[in-house]
Each structure stands twice: as structure tokens, then as C-alpha cells.
Amino acid sequence: MKPRRPMPGPQQGFALVEALISVVVLAVGVMGLLFFQGFLISSATVGNQRVEASLLAEELVSMASADPINAGCYANSGVTTCASAGARDYLSAWELRAKARLPGAAALPPTAVLANDRTYTVTLQWMQKDGGTIRNHRVATQIGG
């Protein structure tokens, strides 16, 4: 007959407690990584929207600067005397692109203003998908002519 070994009393179940603590620590770490991943995706989305707004604004400023005689055609408010139907059509197409590329921009239409002192300002606004934070991008320059 084999002698029975007595079970150690005070250390009984210690490995199980250790394993449970390890699982909790691992779960907290994984949750932290998932939160950080979500934050990175959100930041990348905002960055992409800012780049898109910057490209759109610079595109319109470049067109107005390259055609200073018809700069008023590239404005949807302010001094808007226009002798070029092509330039006016370009502005309309640009507005449609801006509304399509920036989320919520249809509710916050882009503005292009040519002031009396020939200051040309393009303002784009959009709404983030995170619950309605409104972002904007504004570019201003002097148009010669």
C-alpha cells in the first residue's frame, strides 16, 4: 500500500490565483491597446480630412490667382462680377467636389469670398463623424489684377 501524502494547507490554490491575476493583467493590457488603436484611427481620419480640405482650398486659390481678371468668378460671395462662364462653372464643380469629399460639408457649404481690397478667402467646414465636432480650414491671399 502506498503512503498518502498530506496536502499542503496554506499554499493550496496559489497557482490558480496567480493564473487569474495574469489573465486580468493581460486583459487590461489588451483593452489599452484596443483603445489606443481606436484613438490612432480617429486621428488618422481627422488628419485625412484636414489634408483633403487643404488640397481643395489651395486648388481654388490657385485657380483664382492664375486668372486674376476673372477672380470674382471664383467667389460665391463678396465682389462677384464675372465675365467667364467657364470660371463660374469651375467654381460650381469645385463646390460639389468639396461637399462630396468632406463629411457634413453639404450642411456647411464652402465659401469663397473676394473682398473689395482683392483679399481672396476660401473657407471649408465639415463635421466629424464622432458626434458633430465642426472643423474648418481657411486660406486667404491677395489676388493681383
Image (spheres, rainbow, N blue to C red):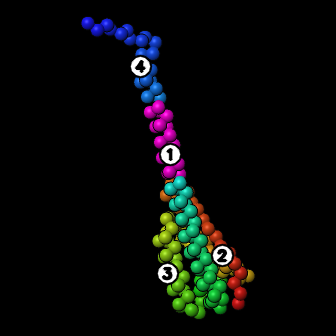
Kindly indicate whether the residue at mark 1 contacts the one at mark 2 (C-beta within 8 angstroms): no
Q: For the residues marked 2 and 1, what is the alpha-carbon distance in whole angstroms?
A: 42 Å
Gap in angstroms between the C-alphas marked 4 and 3? 72 Å
Q: Amino acid at mark 3?
A: Ala
- Type of the residue with mark 1: Leu
Q: Quadrant of the N terminus?
A: top left
In depth, the one of 106 and 68 nearer the eye is 68
Please say whether residue 18 is one of the residues in the magenta stretch.
no
Quadrant for residue 136, please give it.
Answer: bottom right
| Mark 1 in CB contact with mark 4 (< 8 angstroms) | no
* Label 4 SS: loop
User: Mark 4 = which residue?
Assistant: 13
Identify residue for label 3.
Answer: 93
Q: Which label lies toward us, 2 or 1?
A: 1
Q: Which residue is mark 2?
A: 121
Disc 2 residue type (three-letter): Thr
Quarter of the C terminus within the rendering: bottom right
**For the view shown, which residue lies furthest in the front direction?**
1
Measuring from the top left, give residue 4's x and y in whole percent. 32, 8
Residue pointed to by mark 1: 33
Tell me which numbered mark, 3 or 2, is placed earlier along the sequence.
Answer: 3
Q: As drawn, which residue projects farthest toward the bottom?
A: 83
Q: CA distance from mark 1 to mark 4?
A: 31 Å
Sequence-wise first label, 3 or 1: 1
Q: Tag 2: Cα neighbours inside 10 Å, few (<14), some, or many (≥20)? A: many
* Spatial CA span between label 3 and label 2: 18 Å
Q: Residue at x 56, y 75 (%)?
A: 56
| Vertical relation: 131 (above or below) 22 | below
